[in-house]
Amino acid sequence: MRKKSLIYGLLLGLAALLSCQNDQAPTQGTPNNPGGESASLPPPESDFEASLLRWGYLNQSGELVIPAQFDDGRPFTEGLAAVRVKGRWGFIDKKGDYAIPLEFQGAWPFSEGLARVLDYNNKMGFLNRKGEWVIQPEYEDVQDFSNGLARARIGERFGYINRQGQLAIPARFDQASSFEQGMASVKIDGNYGLIDTTGAFLIAARYQKVSPFQQGLARVKLKRKFGFIDKSGKMDIPNQFDNASDFQMGRAPVKQDGLYGLIDVKGVFIVPPKYNQLWYAGESLWAAEKEGRYGYIDAQGQEIIPLEFEQIYSFENGYAPYRIGQLWGYLAADGALLTQPEFGLAWAFREGLARVATRRGIAFINTKGEIAISPHYSDMRDFSEGLALVQAGGR
């Protein structure tokens, strides 16, 4: 029995390395025929030989609808997915046909109708769904479009370009984030402020840290303490906390004297500081940890789900993973268990299905807690637009 447990642990560790890690940044891209060569492109570099195990795409019925023929791939977004064959990246549609040839050193998912790609001069630009250059590759560092703008580094400074490739907000910032809800955090002259999509300052750059407004208040750090300001820039809740998170559902977790509690929008403690960890977990609940045990509280501090788990995550699509001992399960927002603790690893639900590590490998369960897709593949990733990337072979 002990030997079986050891083998199971080794398998789970391998699964964690393969499946829990973030997708690696794409590197290099071949023309329209997979594995084909083109005299007009550099040859594949030796760092990107064909993989022994190939990737394809699975539908929610468990059918491999796009054969495993790629060395790497990314989720579908806006109907297309970036894939790599040897050292070159391109895009396929949901039939598995090449919509954009394998011609690029790197490729990222579509966002707001445009995809960021890296050419063989190590420059980034943007393509449309036809594979046409909308913004020529001339940037060493650019992020995906959000709110109609993309953060771009020009020289040593950051600015923002629009969908026509024009510099809509001059590159004058030392640091800058992508836009979120029409706001971006920028650093200039050593301090942070908030700008809108015209580049105008909503909040002057005078803080050590600032985040976008949530429920009319923005979290700021000043003199090494956190507080909250209103849209006029007035410090509505004094900077007196060692740490803080943004407001959700009229509450914000804040840290004082080494422990976390919940304040309301007036800065009054509704839940006094008594937790080691506290964060908004969705479903109008906050995940809380005290003395190594986790559970969930409501906005008034009532323990809706007792602190009896060894680890928990936030709710997504109605369910949250939890851990007891070395095994994971899922629970609902009312505390009802969807599954017993029976999985070696557990991921969030995506499009009605969640990945789990079983003794036989990675599988998917449905919202009834039943195995919906059996572990037939070496590795599987989450569903996106009805399809999941899977690695075939090895079983």
Image (cartoon, rainbow, N blue to C red):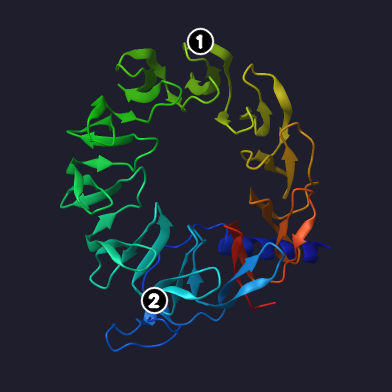
- Please give left or right for residue 239 compared with residue 260 in the image: left
Mark 1 or mark 2: name the one nearer the start of the chain.
2
How would you rate the neighbour count of disc 1 (Cα within 10 Å): few for under 14, some for 14-19, many for 20 or more?
Answer: few
Tell me if I can see residue 224 in this picture.
no
Direction right: furthest residue: 1
Q: How many marks?
A: 2
Cα separation between marks 1 and 2: 58 Å
What amino acid is found at the position of numbered circle 2 in the picture? Pro
> Residue at coordinates 65% horizontally, 73% vertically from top-left?
64
- Please give left or right for residue 385 compared with residue 153 in the image: right
- Please give left or right for residue 297 compared with residue 106 in the image: right
Residue with the mark numbered 2: 101
How would you rate the neighbour count of disc 2 (Cα within 10 Å): few for under 14, some for 14-19, many for 20 or more?
Answer: many
Q: Secondary structure at mark 2?
A: strand
Q: From the viewer's side, name the closer residue of 387 and 310.
A: 387
> Residue at coordinates 19% horizontally, 51% vertically from top-left?
166
Residue 395: percent from the left, percent from the top?
70, 77
Q: Is residue 290 above or below residue 159?
A: above
> Residue 268 got which mark?
1
Given contact means CB atoms under 8 Å apart, are the residues at marks 1 and 2 in contact? no
Q: Is residue 160 above or below residue 13?
A: above
Q: Secondary structure at mark 1?
A: loop
